[in-house]
Image (spheres, rainbow, N blue to C red):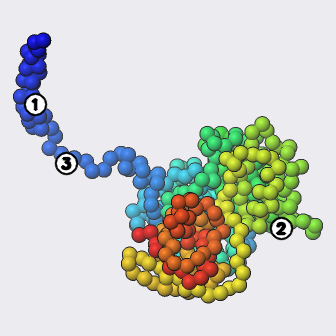
Amino acid sequence: MELDLKGLNKDALKFKEIEKNREKIIHGSSANAIPTQFRANELAHLFHPQKQFVKVLDIIEENKKTKTFVLVPDIDQKTKRLAYFQPGQCISIQVFIEDGIYKRPYSISCSPKQVLDNNMYTITIQRKPNGIVSNYFLDHVKIDDKFEISGPFGEFTYEPLRDAKNIIAIVGESGITPILSMAEAIYDGILNCKLTILYGVEKEENILFYKRLEELKNKCHFIQVEYLVSDESKSYYEQFSKDLIDPYLENENSFFVSGPLEMYDYVNTLLKDYHLPKKYIRHDAFFGTVDIRGNDLYQVTVVIKEKEITIPCRARETLLCAMEKHGITTQSHCHVGECGYCRSKLIEGTVKTFNDSIRASDKEFKYIHPCSSFPESDVTIELPF
């Protein structure tokens, strides 16, 4: 069989023209430098900044133990626009108190429309027993004070691909803040869903945003609000019941639960009767329970880039809280073991955790979340730097 190589030879001759064409393209190109920053990078930084700088524009006293802080960009630190957020998300705020450096997450309590229209966030902070950061804000922070904050984060948000369109929010005390943001977003047309808020408090005077909640309920038929106040026979959260919930049920329902620690176990037990898929029950920074007995003092050795620092830590104190108190900084956001941002290597010792959400592989290779881990012995950990 004789091969016909004429066509092959003809194609091979084309290779001689490649270098000429390449030279032509190079000489015809712009002399401007090749860009190193692209629109995709700019959008990523705008929507997901590692940090932002803000100052306090206004402080609103909600009641004797709660204040709302209005935050706007700190132009001096080159933050021009605050990142957009989803209703229900948090920001982590960094505070210097005496010799300690503390970070705490706070839910954004306004509508995302406030970012678009007024370039601002609001966070609402309630006084807590032994709350180092919350009490500092209420007692010392003033207008024009400046802070470094994170970008918005968290999954306590309405997602139409996951959640039912009918939301029942079971709320206790200051847990109303992320739910208010959702209600505002529904009113503004940002969220397309229905929201029933079952809002419980120990005392009537503890109801936050009552006037605004009533306005939203009266102006928007997609929003309903019921209030529960503790009486002499039972606490407010013991009044959450099937009889209270059932009138608001539709064919499919999502439950959003937000409030103090003591409320969660009761509500989670109540919701088991509905036999819901896990995706239909959402928790805001869920704290599991942990039995910590005694108040023994342990030594925690923190390894940072081959440098070792040893600090004391009591059995009832998380590793992260002890580090903050002694000025050791590490990346952290949620403070409840959910986000994984503070994930660290446990080199020696044992810890007890109140959140078992850590991955199986991390358990196997001894990674922990210091924000939700209490020492049970002297401990050595390596930070993620």
Q: Which of marks 2 and 3 is nearer the N terminus?
A: 3
Q: Which amino acid does label 3 sit on?
A: Ala
Q: How crowded is mark 3: few (under 14 residues within 10 Å), some or many (20 or more)?
A: few
Q: Where is residue 259 in the image (x, y as percent from the top left)?
A: 73, 62
Looking at the image, is 264 positioned above or below residue 190? below
Q: Position of residue 215 (x, y in %)?
A: 75, 50
Looking at the image, is 314 positioned above or below residue 198? below
Q: Which of 144 and 111 is in front in this view?
A: 111
On screen, residue 334 versus residue 224, left or right, reads left
Numbered disc 2: secondary structure? loop
**Which residue is drawn at the image coordinates 44% and 52% (left, top)?**
46
User: Is residue 142 at least partly visible in the picture?
Assistant: no
Residue 103's label in the rendered image is none
Distance between mark 2 and mark 3 Cα atoms: 65 Å
Give the residue pinned by disc 3. Answer: 33
Q: Which of marks 1 and 3 is nearer the N terminus?
A: 1
Numbered disc 1: secondary structure? helix
Residue 203's label in the rendered image is 2
Q: Earlier in the sequence, mark 1 or mark 2?
A: 1
Distance between mark 1 and mark 2 Cα atoms: 82 Å
**Which residue is drawn at the image coordinates 86% and 61% (left, top)?**
238
Q: Position of residue 75 (x, y in %)?
A: 42, 63
Q: What residue type is labelled 1?
A: Ile
On screen, residue 127 versus residue 151, left or right, reads right
Q: Which of 224 and 297 is in front in this view?
A: 297
Quadrant occupied by the C terminus = bottom left
Distance between mark 1 and mark 3 Cα atoms: 25 Å
Q: Nearer the viewer, residue 362 or 199?
A: 362
Residue 18's label in the rendered image is 1
Q: Where is residue 20 in the image (x, y as percent from the top left)?
A: 6, 31
On screen, residue 261 versus residue 299, left or right, reads right
